[in-house]
Image (cartoon, rainbow, N blue to C red):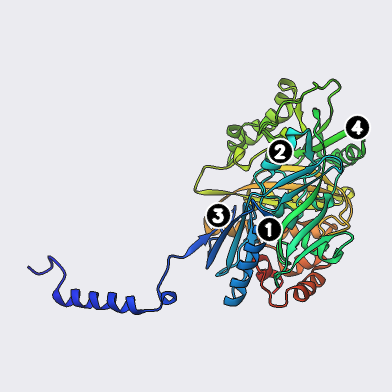
């Protein structure tokens, strides 16, 4: 009966096609594409190869990295490296390239020197767990403990221990595998130019295999909370950063539409007066854990939710929670604690660095730009960042207040366009007051804005071409602004 099965001609044609396909070279056959993404969920990127390299043995890792470099160079593919891929604009991805993911790595403390050597693929949670056992803590680390140590160096992230600069300021040395496969040690004394280029260089100069990093004794800390007008925050924050009694400090701003950015809270931590002889093991709580996930997520699209969260953080929590915690517990916060479970939305980060004396101008820029954009701001955390004299792409050439902003964004083209317009407008205002924006996030800035925020950009690009003339190490940041 017609239409009940394949015809003899169809079977013959299909069999002929299958036979012909069997004769094709293996490389010519279609293979499933490997698609990777970053934390935004907005950058699906096809890659030719995804190499996951465990770093149990550093020597074995070095040889594996060299093999991947040789293979990619022979095929003319770019190489991009990541650990957790928490960037948001494809900074750890290269289209049709080799994506290298580092996993784990040795952690070797030296208590006499106050240092630890760590594999680039180690997560901060692993570092904290190991250092916690011997009574030590990272001097500076990224704000979430599920990020990779090598990635923290490559974006030169900062934390909230005071009064330190970015993470790179606590790194004594790194070892890099360059595009030609050579292994080099970089520090302020050895290969100093390359050290400053790789620090915050987004993996464009080589693959970090391990680092030597400063550590400090773990301590039991007790908080002090001060609610104030946002206009009073900058001088109070600068004074706290200079106070030798304080070990950690951060601030937040109210994001309720009524009185947007008008009120601030400053939270400082000093050593507890009568700590126990044996400190409790580091818990995965972090500074954000005082705000429950339910309260935090209830802010999305809700003025009531934003007001309730601010009341909980500034009035209720300081009264109900004594806040005693070890240094390690405060920093040991995974991203998942407050992550969205709504598949129709994504969380987008911004970060701006402004001179403390221009903080009022920054507040005015945000009040005039963010509410009218329609973008949903959920949080602003303020951190003090000491001057960074080392990295070529320094976002803090002098002392800065870093404002880490979290937005909830829908996934429609209209949502993306609104975020892009707001980001470009806010960057323009921040650069005009002598500030900078952070590079690991969405690639929404104009090229001229990047050049003004980072005056050494052209020199950075020229150095890249000297150290990597074949442009082996590339990612979306390079392709968008530097190629």
Distance between mark 2 and mark 1 Cα atoms: 21 Å
Left or right: residue 279 versus residue 64 is: right
Q: For the residue labelled by badge 2, is the local secondary structure a helix, a strand or a loop?
A: helix
Q: Which mark is residue 245?
A: 4
Q: Nearer the viewer, residue 458 or 204?
A: 204
Judged by depth in the image, the label closer to the viewer, 2 or 4, is 2
Q: State if disc 1 and disc 3 touch (CB < 8 Å).
A: no
Q: Position of residue 430 (x, y in %)?
A: 79, 56
Which of marks 4 and 3 precedes in the sequence? 3
Residue ID at (52%, 42%): 341
Q: Which is closer to the viewer, label 3 or label 2? A: 2
- Image location of residue 335, percent across then percent down: 63, 42
The foreground one among 67 and 330 is 67
**Disc nearest the viewer among 3 and 1:** 1
Q: Residue at x 42, y 68 (%)?
A: 31
Read off the residue under disc 3.
41
3 vs 4, front mark: 4
Distance of label 3 from label 1 (alpha carbons)? 34 Å
As helix, strand or loop, the secondary structure at mark 1 comes to: helix
Q: Position of residue 354 (x, y in %)?
A: 83, 52
- Please give the label number shown on residue 130: 2
The quarter in which the C terminus is drawn is bottom right
Marks 1/4: CA distance? Answer: 42 Å
Mark nearer the N terminus (3 vs 2): 3
- Local packing at callout 3 (Cα closer than 10 Å; few below 14, some 14-19, many 20+) is some
| Residue 59 image label | 1
How far from the left and from the top, in percent, is residue 213? 80, 48
């Amino acid at each position: 009966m017609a239409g009940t099965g394949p015809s003899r001609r169809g079977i013959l044609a299909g069999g002929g096609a299958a036979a012909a396909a069997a004769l094709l070279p293996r490389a010519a056959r279609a293979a499933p594409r490997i698609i990777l993404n970053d934390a935004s969920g907005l950058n699906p990127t096809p890659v030719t190869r995804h190499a996951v390299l465990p770093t149990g043995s550093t020597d074995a890792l070095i040889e594996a990295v060299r093999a991947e470099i040789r293979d990619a160079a022979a095929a003319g593919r770019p190489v991009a490296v990541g650990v957790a891929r928490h960037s948001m604009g494809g900074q750890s991805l290269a289209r049709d390239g080799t994506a290298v993911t580092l996993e784990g790595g040795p952690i070797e403390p030296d208590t006499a020197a106050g240092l630890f050597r760590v594999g680039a693929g180690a997560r901060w949670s692993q570092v904290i767990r190991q250092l916690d056992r011997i009574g030590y803590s990272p001097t500076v680390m990224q704000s979430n403990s599920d990020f990779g140590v090598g990635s923290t160096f490559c974006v030169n992230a900062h934390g909230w221990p005071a009064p330190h600069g970015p993470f790179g300021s606590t790194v004594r040395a790194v070892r890099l595998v360059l595009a030609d496969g050579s292994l080099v040690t970089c520090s302020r004394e050895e290969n100093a130019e390359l050290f400053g280029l790789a620090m915050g260089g987004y993996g464009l100069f080589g693959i970090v295999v391990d680092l030597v990093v400063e550590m400090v004794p773990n301590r039991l800390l007790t908080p002090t909370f001060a609610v104030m007008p946002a206009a009073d925050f900058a001088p109070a924050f600068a004074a706290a950063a200079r106070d030798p009694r304080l070990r950690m400090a951060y601030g937040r701003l109210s994001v309720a539409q009524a009185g947007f950015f008008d009120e601030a809270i400053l939270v400082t931590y000093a050593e507890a007066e009568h700590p126990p002889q044996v400190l409790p093991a580091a818990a995965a709580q972090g500074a954000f854990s005082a705000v429950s996930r339910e309260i935090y997520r209830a802010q999305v699209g809700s003025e009531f939710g934003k007001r309730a969260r601010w009341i909980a953080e500034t009035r209720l929590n300081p009264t109900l929670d004594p806040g005693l915690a070890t240094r390690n517990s405060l920093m040991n916060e995974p991203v998942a604690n407050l992550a969205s479970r709504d598949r129709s939305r994504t969380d987008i980060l911004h970060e701006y660095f402004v001179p403390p004396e221009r903080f009022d101008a920054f507040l005015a820029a945000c009040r005039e730009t963010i509410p009218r954009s329609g973008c949903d701001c959920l949080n602003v955390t303020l951190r003090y960042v000491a001057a960074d004299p080392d990295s070529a792409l320094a976002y803090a050439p002098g002392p800065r207040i870093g404002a880490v902003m979290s937005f909830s964004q829908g996934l429609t083209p209209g949502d993306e366009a609104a975020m892009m317009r707001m980001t470009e407008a806010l960057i323009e205002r921040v650069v005009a007051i002598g500030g900078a924006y952070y590079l690991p996030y969405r690639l929404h800035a104009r090229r001229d804005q990047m050049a003004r925020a980072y005056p050494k950009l052209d020199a950075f690009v020229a150095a890249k071409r000297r150290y990597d003339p074949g442009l082996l190490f590339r990612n979306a940041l390079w392709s968008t602004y530097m190629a």
